[in-house]
Image (cartoon, helix red, strand yellow):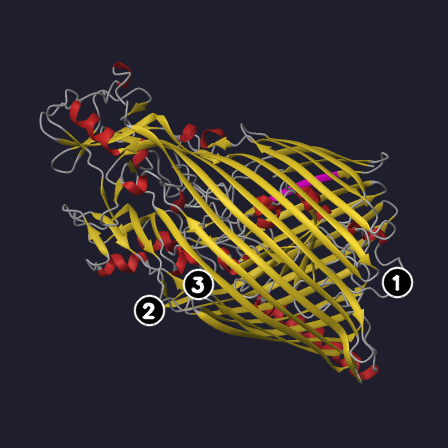
Amino acid sequence: MKLTVLGSAIRKIVWAEIALTAALGTTAFAQVQPAATAAATKADTASAQKDGQDANATAAAPTAASGASAGTSSVKQLQKFEVTGSLIRSADKQGRTEVQVITAKEIQQSGYTTVADFLRGTAVNSASSWSQSTAQSSAPGGAGLALRGLSEKYTLVLIDGQRVANYAQPVNFTDTFFDINTIPMNIVERIEIVKTGAVSVYGSDAIAGVVNIITKKNFEGLQIDGQLGKAQHPGNAQGTFSVLGGLGNLTSDRWNITAAASYYRDSGSTLADRDMTKNQDFTQFPGGNAAPLGPNQQSYWQLADGTHQAFNPCPPGSNATATGGQSCTYNVANSTSLIPSTTRLNAKVRGTFKIDDTTEAYAGFWASRNETVQLNGPASLSSQTNVFDPSTGTVSPVGRTVSASNPFNPFGVPTRINLTFPDNKRVTDTTSTFLMANTGVKGSFDTAKFGNWDWSAEYAHSQSTVASTFSNQLNVAGLENMLANGTYNFSNPGSTPNGLNGVFQDDNQLSITKLDQVLAKASTTSLFTLPAGGVGLGVGTEFRHESTVINSQTYATQGITAPANVQSVDGERNVAAAFYQVDIPIIRNLTFTQSGRYDHYSDFGGAFSPSFALRFQPIRMLTAYASYSRGFRAPTAVENAQSVYLAHQNLVDPNDPSGVPTKHFTTEQTTGNPNLQPEHTKNYNIGFTLSPDATTDFGAAFYKVHIDSVIGTPDPNAILQANDPNLVVRNPDGTIRYIKMPFVNLGSLDTDGFDLDFRKSVGTKYGTFTLSGDWAYVWHFKLKSGGETQDFAGNNLALLQPFGASNPRWKGNTSLSWDYRQLTTTLTWQYTGPYTNAVAAEFGDGGTLSVASYSQFNLVATYRGFKHWTIYGGIQNLFDRKPPFDVEWQSTPDITGYDQSLYTNLGRFFQVGATYRF
């Protein structure tokens, strides 16, 4: 769909409705929320239950594919709903900003088996988000969201409206995020995604939007769920077992206790389990290479003139054919994870107690333990293997010269070696633990002059602990001893069975983030009355304490082990805030909302964030909304505390000592900067929702986000081009040792685009058919720094930034559901658009310079015809589509051939499951 055509259609519809209103003088009514579908609806839809009622009975949006019953029930009483992104409860479900509502049933009907996978597949999560499947991630085991492709640090995730501690290790060492792997399926009531900035309500981090996970509470009865799944290809056997139970009726008994527990297991898979990666040979694709794709896939001698010579003979499991005798090449697919094995345990309990008819208290506790085991290929020694020097805080190459006296050195002179150890797999075993304890009181009271008020006071403590064990790290002293004394036969390792004694050892890392929050709010919808209606007011205050401690790997930071994986942060701060919201009816069908928030940070100062919004409903079927807000993002402890991180990236050295620009796996030293200033932001959002009848919805919106003083690191390619010796540290032979990349305030970032959603239900004697969709289009994504502007929309230039990845313009989901009696069947089409391979074009990496689009179809059927039982089954990736090939993802450390921020190569996946309720 061309944007000009879309814009013309929107203008015609809006002006037609306005003209009709002016001519007929139609009175505005509260727009009725139609049935939800497999694509989530837009608008400020109901977020909270009416006090004292079962959560399942009062969910904001009806369950998926319920079009047959939509619009048939009559409203018996006016209910007030809490709305994510607003301080004021409202009886109107259609609001002033863009909110996507997702029910638990929609997640199940999508074909996804986890909440995290579903959320990462939403259209608004368009780019630059990472999961546990990311190769050699700096946040192993974690998965985050990046609304609008703005990287994960710009998305705020809430649990029941409360902030929670971020995952204890940031991804790419730049993006703090909440690990959505923590959320089990059986505790989710619904999820609401605010698709515009909400800093004026929630504070820093809510730049791109807010994801509010509303959990089940006030549940009565017992529900048992079981699910089994298996990929068609080897690996990835999955299973889930969960229990949800509740006692007490909040209305009659004045108390309720709801508890849930779940177990999830995925056996994982390796690159050897998929045709695309099992041979480590991408030559069937334009620009594709064959192994060796990195230094840990080959062994060779590096001669004095710089040439390479394979061992003679090559060790078992390797051969020199592919390189013409230059190196002995290994296939490492079997020792490298495609999708890591995962085990997740969850338990959550909440007790709610009615103090009187208008006041209730609650207390809750939630514990989650996730273990992820990722294979990172065999250990190796190469020119890129560095060791940390704690005395100077720098890195240097690990010695790899084999002494002349070593009996396995055939040259009789000291000679450098590149050595792969195929039997010593590097494994990252990560256990992440999330804990949350919260309590609060809420209620309402009436006043004679200033309306009816709702109020709440809450306290929450949450923390994330991430403990990782890294197997088969090189012990530097043991390695040097082996190279000098000849304890290991390079060509025939079996002849020296004890030759590697002392060469390898495990290393460990522990990280903890904590957050304590005190939050108090009060609001009324009728502070006083104007001719057009009541004036609403909401006020609140918040205090929180945040702390982050990331300890470096125990032995790497002492220079005992290699490679030099050093990542350390130690910071804490206090944040105090006051905020408000005012809803003013200008005329009967036009409401103006103004909100603001002042935050004071103990580590840099304060900032005020205002927001202005309009909601216009000229006739019942049409609601239009527009908003403008200013905000900020405070530097995180990773960015402004005493922090250091050693990262690695494939970069082209234009000053390579060979005289030819050459790509190397380059070490980057990133450090915190206490002089950073906060980012300042502006958000614009305008859109409408059109519902001509109870079976039809159509919505469209335009968004724009502007960020000044973007916090990041300089462009590493620009640093290499300038070749400043203060930033580019080289070895004596001229090769790069590492480059320095401190966090700085860069220039500005602008992104804008469009959202589209639709739903149409048709009732027939054969059941109800519902077609629905949710799509996003990225128009621009411009980063301006150093006088240069780059547009990342529709290409992969953001790969050159620490946070970024490919950014396709289009992403969307469309589903067709069929409801017939007790059977619901849903076919979902998931689409990710093509993108230009601008990085390959810039550095001459070959290929077609474009990456194809990707379509995946999921099919799920659910049957509810047996008493107490719900039975379902489905096929994910119905046609077993592989991700599109990208030449930039075929070399170490990735070696998958596709962008891991957008895709996983799970392949066709079958699942069956059942739910029993009583």
Residue beneath disc 2: 786
Q: Say what secondary structure mark 3 lies in.
A: loop
Looking at the image, the residue that sits furthest to the front is 355
Residue beneath disc 1: 75
For the residues carrying marks 2 and 1, which lies nearer the camera in this image?
A: 1
Which secondary structure dominates the residues rendered in magenta?
Answer: strand
- Foreground residue among 530 and 102: 530
Q: CA distance from mark 2 to mark 1?
A: 59 Å
Residue at point 19%, 58% (across, down): 725
Left or right of residue 739, residue 645 in this image: right
Whether pointer 1 and pointer 3 mark residues with C-beta atoms closer than 8 Å, the reply is no
For the residues carrying marks 1 and 3, which lies nearer the camera in this image?
A: 3
**Image: 532 above or below 426:** below
Q: Amino acid at mark 1?
A: Val
Q: Amino acid at mark 2?
A: Gly
Query: Around disc 3, counting alpha carbons within 10 Å, would you say few (fewer than 14), some (14 to 19), or many (20 or more)?
Result: many
Quadrant of the frame with the C terminus: top right
- Which numbered tag is attached to residue 635? 3
Residue at point 85%, 66% (across, down): 78
**Image: 377 above or below 745:** above
Looking at the image, the residue that sits furthest to the left is 413
